[in-house]
Image (cartoon, grey):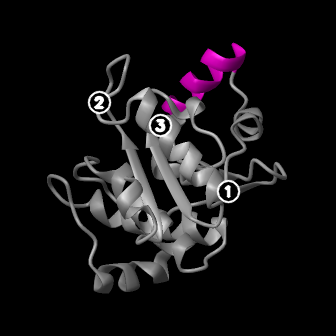
Amino acid sequence: LEGAWSSVDVVMVSDQAETENGGVVTAVVRKRVLELAAQEPSKLVWVDSRKRPELFRGVAIKPNRDEAEDACRRLFGTVDFARLARESDARPLIVTHGERGALVIDGRDGVEQWAPTRRVTPVDICGAGDSFSAGAASALACGASTLEAARFGNIVASITVTKKGTGTSSPAEVIAASVDVP
């Protein structure tokens, strides 16, 4: 992690293990990622944590709605995405809502924006969150606003879910799908 840190533009943290202690992203790894992120705040650190999004601070955090609701309940006893964004100093917090799109909240100023997605008929939702993360993080790294990045992530995910298995989204498919975005 430390050796590669300076040579990358984006650090993607995929904390998907549903065990109490995590998989590769243990408490020690999480602590070091957050230390490195604090030392270099201009570096995009994108976190997709299934069971522990509330433990990350000062980075981009992308849970889905259920994961964000669970994180809020663990922290506050109630669902409050804006408070989760503030408490996490999220840069930003993007809560995906499947076919409805994504809620984007900046933890520093609390501004909430909605990024709708295009309507498709899903075949298999496997990989939708990862596709969203790849698209949105890439867009942010290229200078997009958080709302533009969420819209781009939605486009990528909307293509992925129309394919059997863990789908992909080619550049040509993304360009073609972009005309259908609300």
Q: CA distance from mark 3 to mark 2?
A: 11 Å
Give the CA distance from mark 1 to mark 3: 29 Å
* Mark 1 Cα shell of 10 Å, populated few (<14), some (14-19), many (≥20): some
Report if residue 136 lies within the magenta region. Answer: no
Give the residue furthest to the front: 3
Looking at the picture, which amino acid does disc 1 mark? Trp
Q: Mark 3, residues whose alpha carbon is within 10 Å: few (<14), some, or many (≥20)?
A: some
Query: Which residue position holds label 2?
Result: 23
Question: Height in image: 78 above or below 181?
Answer: above
Q: What label does residue 114 carry, if any?
A: 1
User: Which region is colored magenta?
Assistant: 66-78
The residue indicated by pointer 3 is: 30
Frontmost residue, 172 versus 30: 30
Q: Nearer the viewer, mark 2 or mark 1?
A: 2
Q: Of tags 3 and 2, which is closer to the observer? A: 3
User: Callout 3, which amino acid?
Assistant: Arg
Examine the rendering and report whether any part of residue 132 can be seen: no
Q: Nearer the viewer, residue 93 or 158?
A: 93
> Nearer the N terminus, badge 1 or badge 3?
3
